[in-house]
Image (cartoon, rainbow, N blue to C red):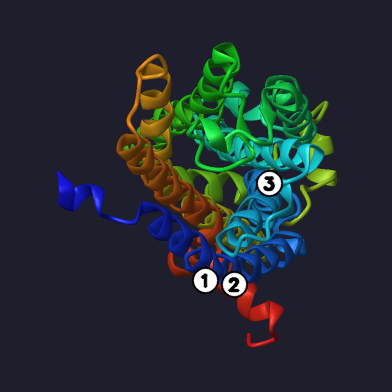
Amino acid sequence: MNNTSSINFGLIIQTINRYVPIPLLFFGIIGNLLNIFIFTRQTFRTNICVIYFLASTISDSFSLGIGLVTRLLAGFNVDPTQYSSGLCKIKFFITYYSAYTGAWFISLACIERYLCSSTNVRTRQFVTIKRAYISIIIILISGFLAFGEQFYCIDINQQLLGAPQSCYQLKRNIACQIADSLLQFLLEILTPAIVMIVFGLLVLRNVRRKHSRINPRERINTLASTMAVPAVNSFNAEQQQQTPPPPVNIKNAAKNQLLSTNISRTAQKCDAQLIILLIIQVATFVICSCPASIYKFYSVATIYDIKSSLRQAIENTFVAVSLQAFFLHNAIKFYIYTLCGAIFRKELMKLFRLA
C-alpha cells in the first residue's frame, strides 16, 4: 500500500497532458484538413454518406482544437479556462457538443448506408440530400438543448473538492454531476455506439442479401431488351410495308449498355468502399470511447461514495488516459480512410496532382 501511495499521480497526469496531445494534434489537424479538401471535391459532392463524413470531420476539428489544445495547455499550467469561468463553460460545451455531433453524424451515415443498401426501392428513395441536411440541422439543434446545462453545471474552483482540474462539474451540486455525466454517457457515447452497431450489422445483412439475389441472366435480358426492335403500330399491313421500322444500331446500343454497366459498377464499388470505411470507423469509435464510457458510468454509480485521496488520484489518472483515447478517434479518421479506401486514396492523389 505504501508503494502504491508513493506514486506521483499528479506528475503522471501532467506528463500525459503535456506530451500525448502533441502528436494527436499534429496528425489530427493535418488529417482533418485533408479530409475536408477531399470530401468537398466534385467526386463526393452528391454522395450523402460523404456529406455526413464531412460534417463529422468538421466536428472533430472543433473537438481537437478546443478540447485537446486546452488539455495540452493544462499540462504546462497555462490553460486560461482553469481561471476564467466563462472560458471554462465554453470549453466544456464545445468539447461535449462537437464530440456529440461527430458521433451522431457517423450514426446517420450508418443509417443512410442501411437505407441505400435495401432491396426495397421505396426505402432507397427515402434517402435524399435535402433530408440529409435536415437531419444534420436536427442533430445540431438537439446538441444545444442537451448540453446547455453546462453553462450552469460547469465552473472553476472545483479542484479543492477532488476534481481532476479547477474547471469541472459543480462538486457541491450532486444533481449537476449526475445530469452532466449521464448526458455525456448516454447521448455522446452509448446511444450513438448502439445505433452504429445495429445499423452496421443491418448494412452487412442487406449486402449479403443483395449478393445472394444476383441473377446472371439479368444483364443478358437487359441488353437484349435494349437491342430489341420496337413494334410498329399500324392500321393495316399495307401501311407497315410502306413505312418500315427505323433501323436499330446494335453496335451503339451495346456500347451504351456497356457504358451504363461500367458506371453502375463504379458506383457499386464506391458504395462498397464507403461501407468498409464506415464499419472500421464504428469499430474505432467503440474502442476509443470505451474507457470514457466506463468512467462516466462508474462516476455516477459511485457519486455518493466517500473517496480517499489515493482513490481520487487513480480516478483522475484514468480520466486523463480515457480522454486521450477519446481524442485519438477524432485524430485518426484520415489515416483510416487512406489505408482502407482505394477511392479515397485516388482522390488524395488527384488533390496533389499525382494521378
The numbered mark at residue 23 is: 1
Under circle 1, the secondary element is helix
State yes or no: discs 1 and 3 in contact (Cβ < 8 Å): no
Find residue 67 and report its horizontal and vertical position in percent: 63, 50
Find residue 231 and report its horizontal and vertical position in percent: 70, 37
Residue closer to the observer: 253 or 283: 283
C-alpha span from label 2 to label 3: 24 Å
Q: Residue at 84% of width from left, 45% of height from top? A: 243
Q: Quadrant of the N terminus?
A: top left
State yes or no: discs 2 and 1 in contact (Cβ < 8 Å): yes
The numbered mark at residue 82 is: 3
Q: Earlier in the sequence, mark 1 or mark 3?
A: 1
For label 1, count other residues whose C-alpha is less than 10 Å away and answer few (under 14), some (14-19) or many (20+).
few
Find residue 302 and report its horizontal and vertical position in percent: 36, 19
Which residue does the numbered mark 2 point to in the structure image? Answer: 26
Under circle 3, the secondary element is helix
User: Tag 3: residue type?
Assistant: Gln
User: Tag 1: residue type?
Assistant: Pro
Q: Residue at 65% of width from left, 49% of height from top? A: 63
Under circle 2, the secondary element is helix
Q: Nearer the viewer, mark 1 or mark 3?
A: 3
Judged left or right of residue 165, residue 29 is: right
* 103 is higher (above) or lower (below) than 65: above
Residue closer to the observer: 13 or 214: 13
